Amino acid sequence: MKNNTEKKISFGSYAKNVLFKNKVIILFTVLCIGCIAASNTSLNYIASEVFSRFGRNACLVLALIIPCLAGLGMNFGIVVGAIAAQIAIFFVVHWGFTGIGGFMLCALFATPMAILFGWLLGILFNKTKGSEMITGLVLGFFADGVYRLFTLYIIGGLIPYDDPNLLDRGFGLRNAFDLSDSIKYALDDISFVTVFRILMLFIIVVQLINIVFGSKKNMTVDKKESMGKIIASAIGLVLSFVLMAVPGISAMIGGTRLILSDTLRIAMIVYLLSLVIRKFALKRDITKDKLVKTAVLTAAVLALSYIPAIRDILKSVSISACTYAVICLFCFFNNWILDTKLGQDMRTVGQNRIVAGSAGINVDKIRITATCISTVLAAWGQLIYLQNLGTFNTVQQQSNVGLYAVAALLVGGASVQKANNRQAIIGVVLFHTLFVVAPLAATQIIGDSAISEYIRMFICYGVIAVSLAMHAWKKKDKKVVKKTAGDEENTDAVKSVIWP
Amino acid sequence: MEKLKDSLKRVNLPRLIIILFFLFIVLLAYVNDINVNSYIGSTIKYWGMWGILVLAMVPSIKCGIGPNFGISLGIVCGLLGSLLAIEFGITDMFNAIIPGLGPWAAIIFAMISSAFFAWFVGVAYGKILNSVKGSEMTVTTYIGYSFIYLMCIVWFRAPFTNSEIKWPIGASGVRNSLSMDSSFGGVLNDFLGFSLGGEGGVYIPTGLVIFFLLCCLVIFLYFRSKSGMAMTAAGSNPSFARANGIDVDKMRIKGIAISTVLGAIGIVVYTQGFGILQAYTAPLQMGFQCVAAILIGGATTSKAKISHVIIGTFLFQGLLMFTPPVSNKLLAGTDISDTMRQIIQNGVILYALTKAKGGSSNEE
């Protein structure tokens, strides 16, 4: 009996704990559901809109995680990364490169520029330690001004840019920059098969390198395992060619977009099969528990996806294989870099600069590195964003990048000092759902659509203001506890000066 | 060598650059046959209009909070006061008693009512800022922004009934921009205004300048008083002030409340000079402009004087007035001034941030 109540209490406190930890997410989920209910719009539309926005924005939000963990707070300075991407686009489009080649060239040009900008930004952050966020914000505005000077007066003026299609009045770029003939959907249109083949080839090459160079260095490389991986990848590669010959399947995986319902079902089955194969054929250490759980989950997903209401939604959503693969890559990159020595140093610096400094870490250098990485990721993220959008406002496109990305990350439950991929992903989904439905709901309730822009912006700024205030509040509480002893001494000293 | 370094440190670099740049632009204007007199006139006019908004930075810097990026809270209160003055038809009401008194009554009503709102908003705002010591600048910026958008929603549905305020079609809400001609537009500007040097000379808006300088004097005297001294002490050395029995937190609240009230009065003066009341998102960047102006004048994020306000506002506004005609002459039909404002304004703030040594009290 006693045991039972104890369990209940512990469950209660556990639930309370979970609720408290996820309070921001829960609040925004409720808000989203309320807005969806009030908006009176079909779920199909909302779902497809949210998924396309997710593909566009996720990378920019993922670019914020590393500086956050390095103690730089929310990096509003990713605006400079976006600027690097846009400058690269101006020239690549001008030179007439199109498609994925043009896109890669953009990335190639944007990267060194982003590194340079990130380095400068890092130096600036090092000079303003403790107020990086306001610095990043003001720098965003400053960079905006310089960029405007560049696009409106210098391009075509000082820098020869002979392109009558893009220049107004002889110098300065046109207001809207159209990408539909150049790199629009360059990344989005890559089919699943291509991504799959690239992945398989990549695995083969990596394993071959492992075998060749690993043996030279006398490292204990499990050759058998590497060979197994190579064979599996080769089979996958062959299979992809075989499947492409089948008409129905080739349309499904060879097209530019994947239908979410098919993708979800197949992905779940493939995952289950791979677990089964690994357990029984390769005798890997996989618990029965996990197997059962996955099986149940697969069954549930399959069953749910055949319910008409859900099926319709899932069918209306099409996702781009390559863009989503890149998003996964960004997540892996964030995780990978945090496991390296550099990542460990970043975390140490993020927790306490003084301790990190006395442990022999070059704090300033680590902070600059973190800013550079973030800026480069932001540049790539902006490229992905723009190739999906297809047209952009030459002068102002970048100005809200930092704002939206930061707000999304904070909605996902991140704080100024702690953020991870999961929070970024959840945050993007919630924030953009709200972004889509809040204006619709406002239109339904108040009866005017003009107010929607104000509501959107209020949500953005409100979220940031509240979470920054909460963070500062918590920090102050900690400081007060730490400082009380020191403070008393201090006042005593002052007193003794005044009244000796 | 040491002396040279010392004097270099004392010279405020941005101010020096801006002064030289300003003189250069004025010279260019002379060379290019631009009517310099009229632009000097508008510089003086905008100097008076912006002056009080910039003056609002002084108490917030002196009480230790740093430049008040959230001056938009005061601005919104000022707009509310002005709108109420129009809504109640104060001008017509008093014009009926004594002709010509109306606009004065309206502007005084607007100032008093907006100062009243601003005091309460400022006190609440100060309480928030006391709990976020060390990150005031970031928090003030975002509170200011979100408050403006909140008020946008309010403006949109506010139950005003005066036909001058509400949308031509529709029952309520505030227009995007409404003329002040029928209420208190230009009342300070035109008071004793005269043209220096006869026809085509420099127009001096005497009433406006007198009011601005009067406000400066009041703030100057306040900081000579006991309460003002206490506030300065609380800002410059909190633990010393605490030891002397000064309630630092209370002083900070007082400082930010005065700043907010000045912001509210400032926007009323600005609106009467501008002749058009702009609600909605127009005040969004005003906070940054005010901060930049006082920093150009030579203030830092922790030290400010009245002279910084007077010099800084004049330089900044002068630069903004003179750039459009000059750039128009030199670059055929372009207006580079807004881009330049953005670069100068934010560049100056960045410079001040790097000199602030890690914010007010963040570094341990």
Image (cartoon, helix red, strand yellow):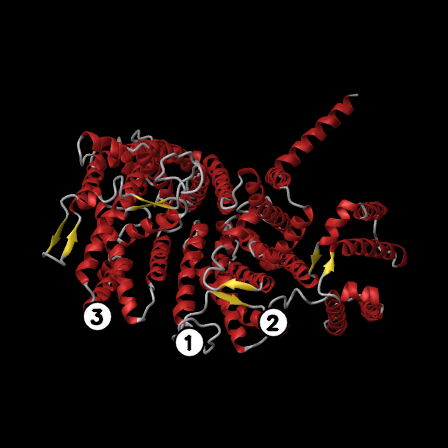
Is B28 located above or below residue B302 in the figure?
below
Q: Residues within 10 Å of mark 3 (few under 14, many from 20)?
A: some
Q: Quadrant of residue B103?
A: top left
Type of amino acid at the residue the image marks with label 3: Asn
> Pointer 3 indicates a residue of which chain?
B
Q: CA distance from mark 3 to mark 2?
A: 48 Å
Comparing B323 with A121, the one in front is: B323
- Quarter in which the C terminus of chain A is drawn: top left
Would you say A18 lies left or right of B104 here?
Answer: right
Q: Which residue is mark 3?
A: B32
Mark seen at residue A104: 2
Residue B151 seen anywhere in this rendered image of the structure: yes
* Mark 1 element type: loop
Q: Which residue is mark 1?
A: A159
For the residues bearing labels 3 and 2, Cβ distance under 8 angstroms: no
Q: Residues within 10 Å of mark 1 (few under 14, many from 20)?
A: few
> Foreground mark, 3 or 2?
3
Query: Where does the image place residue B303, in percent across and percent down from the top left?
Result: 28, 46
Query: Where does the image place residue A496, in percent across and percent down from the top left?
Result: 30, 33
Residue occupying the far right of the picture: A280
Residue drawn where x is 43% and y is 64% of the image: A147
> Pointer 1 indicates a residue of which chain?
A
Type of amino acid at the residue the image marks with label 1: Ile
Q: CA distance from mark 3 to mark 1?
A: 26 Å
Type of amino acid at the residue the image marks with label 2: Met
Q: CA distance from mark 2 to mark 1?
A: 23 Å
Q: Quadrant of residue B170?
A: top left
Q: Are marks 3 and 1 on the same chain?
A: no
> Foreground mark, 2 or 1?
1
Would you say A204 lies left or right of A350 here?
Answer: right
* Mark 3 element type: loop
Query: Where does the image place residue A424, in percent across and percent down from the top left?
Result: 61, 50
